[in-house]
Amino acid sequence: AKAMGKGQYHVFDPTLHQKALKRLTLETALRKAIEHQEFLVHYQPIINLQTGKISGFEALVRWQHPQKGLVSPGEFIPICEETGLINDIGYWVFQQACNQLKIWQQTLKNDRLKISINLSVRQFSQMNLMEKVAETVTKTKISPQSLTMEITESALIDNPTHARTLLHEIRDQDIHISLDDFGTGYSSLSYLHTLPIDILKIDRSFINPLSQEESDLGLIPPIIQIGQTLKMKVVAEGIETPEQLEILRKLQCDFGQGYWFAKPLNIREATALLQSNPQW
Ligand code: C2E
Ligand code: CA
Ligand code: CA
Ligand code: CA
């Protein structure tokens, strides 16, 4: 603390100052990025574990920074959420994903292919979000049932009243709802079954420790059981090894996603994968 005279003290923390500066720089860069359309969407396949076929893709945003190259969402989504930029970016991702889904469904002559899109907490407060979603669905002429909105368990817990309203608005449009990062947010089971949720997505942290058939399965069997009891589908994320896949398949987990199948892919790579692994 540096004395400022007259008994006043000013705490100067250089690291704090640098952090604030870095944040501001990032925020400015993000606003420019929206203007210059520097975002793109990658697609990670979601596999039906019983058939081994591609059920659909999860849309994951990336920032193609002119100097830094591809920036991962973990580095910029939190700031987009705090500043409200997520509203523009989130809706843009939704539109891109819908357009791409339409293209795939048409070229592959398969309208069963699905797309999942992440919806962040902050987008909950965007009042006309569902109107815009409905507009895009109508314009692209995709079936709303081929869309899934992924909402994190923690988002539900942080805004229970708001979340309930939004979830019902999504459901009213026949769009599916997936509870993302399930198991990390401590939602109460009695609450869970009163919400219109179609899919539970088991967080990667539960899948990661799985190594061999004999290994401790942890909370995975009860989570799958909860899903089945509540008539929800269960997706395991972060499958990285064939051992993990085998365990999850034996446990009757419905869908899986992870580097073992594929990393998030650009449009060209995802299209090639679809052509080599038809969805039925
Ligand atoms: P998430 O929704 O839980 O997405 C899964 C993340 O796990 C993705 O990271 C994906 O690349 C990564 N992943 C997939 N398989 C594996 C695996 O086998 N091993 C490991 N270690 N990781 C795997 P990514 O793309 O960096 O996205 C991070 C998070 O950013 C997402 O987590 C999601 O919360 C957020 N995000 C991404 N795109 C969007 C978006 O368009 N809107 C919003 N609101 N959030 C987004
Ligand atoms: Ca997700
Ligand atoms: Ca997740
Ligand atoms: Ca996550």
Image (spheres, grey):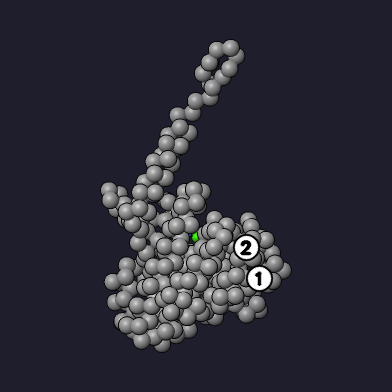
Residue at 47%, 80% in the rendered image: 143
Residue at 43%, 51% in the rendered image: 76
**Pointer 1 residue:** 195
Left or right of residue 91: residue 154: right
In the rendered image, the vertical position of residue 120 relative to residue 115, given as above or below: above
Residue at 43%, 41% in the rendered image: 23
Callout 2–callout 1 Cβ contact below 8 Å: yes
The percent position of residue 233, horizontal first and vertical second, equals: 56, 77
**Looking at this view, is 228 or 37 the one in front?**
37
Query: First in sequence: mark 2 or mark 1?
Result: 2
When asked about the image quadrant of residue 63, the answer is bottom left
The percent position of residue 13, horizontal first and vertical second, equals: 49, 28
Please tell me how crowded label 1 is: few (under 14), some (14-19), or many (20+) other residues with Cα within 10 Å.
some
Can residue 216 be seen at all in this image of the molecule?
Answer: no
Element at badge 2? helix
**Pointer 2 residue:** 163
The percent position of residue 196, horizontal first and vertical second, equals: 63, 73
Under mark 1, the amino acid is: Leu
